[in-house]
């Protein structure tokens, strides 16, 4: 019976490992999708901002763009989205730490090569 007990034990450990990895990859995948969605929303806000600024400068000859309520609202939305983006990145790092996953050099290169969201490292004034 020793052989069957060993086999059963090994099978249970394997199933446990697979379940743990599946949970880990599910959490990481969801966070990465959230990050991509937030970056897309930031890009959308910047497109709206560019359009509004263009309209104010060219069509309305308005030189006081920074005081325009619509421009302020879009800038505030971008600030909020950048905060959410940073939170998701922190959550992703926490999940990786929780599961003891070391970030590989290849993964760092891939994540760093993602174009940062516009305004991510720019002063928000």
Image (cartoon, helix red, strand yellow):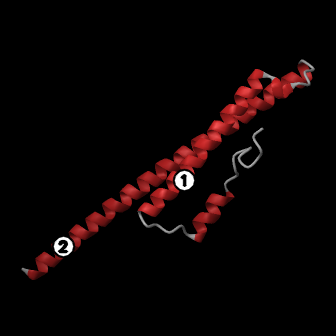
Quadrant for the N terminus in the image: bottom left
Q: Tag 1's secondary structure?
A: helix
SS class of the residue under badge 2? Answer: helix
Tell me if mark 1 has few (under 14), some (14-19) or many (20+) residues whose alpha carbon lies within 10 angstroms of its own. Answer: few
Residue occupied by mark 2: 9
Instruction: Decide if residue 68 is on the left or right side of residue 74.
Output: right
- Residue 49 vs 24, above or below: the answer is above
- Can you give x and y, in whole percent of width and height, for residue 22 in the image? 37, 58
Image coords of residue 3 (percent x, y): 12, 81
Direction from residue 60 to residue 89 in the image, left or right = left
Mark in front: 1 vs 2: 1
Residue at the spot of label 1: 90
| Residue lying at 83% horizontally and 28% vertically, measured from the top left | 66
x, y percent for residue 11: 22, 70
Query: For the point 48% across and 57% down, which residue is it?
Result: 94
Mark before the other along the chain sequence, 1 or 2: 2
Residue sitting at 86 percent across and 22 percent down?
56
At horizontal 79% and vertical 28% (from top left) the residue drawn is: 51
């Amino acid at each position: 019976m020793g052989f069957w007990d060993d086999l059963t034990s090994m099978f249970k450990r394997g199933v446990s490992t697979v379940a743990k990895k599946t949970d880990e990859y599910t959490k990481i995948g969801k966070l990465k999708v959230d990050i991509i969605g937030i970056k897309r929303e930031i890009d959308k806000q910047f497109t709206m901002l560019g359009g509004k600024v263009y309209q104010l400068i060219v069509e309305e000859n308005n030189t006081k763009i920074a005081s325009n309520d619509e421009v302020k609202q879009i800038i505030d939305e971008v600030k909020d989205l950048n905060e959410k983006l940073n939170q998701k990145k922190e959550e992703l790092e926490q999940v990786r730490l929780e599961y003891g996953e070391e970030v590989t050099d290849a993964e760092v290169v891939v994540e760093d090569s993602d174009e940062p969201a516009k305004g991510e490292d720019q002063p928000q004034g």
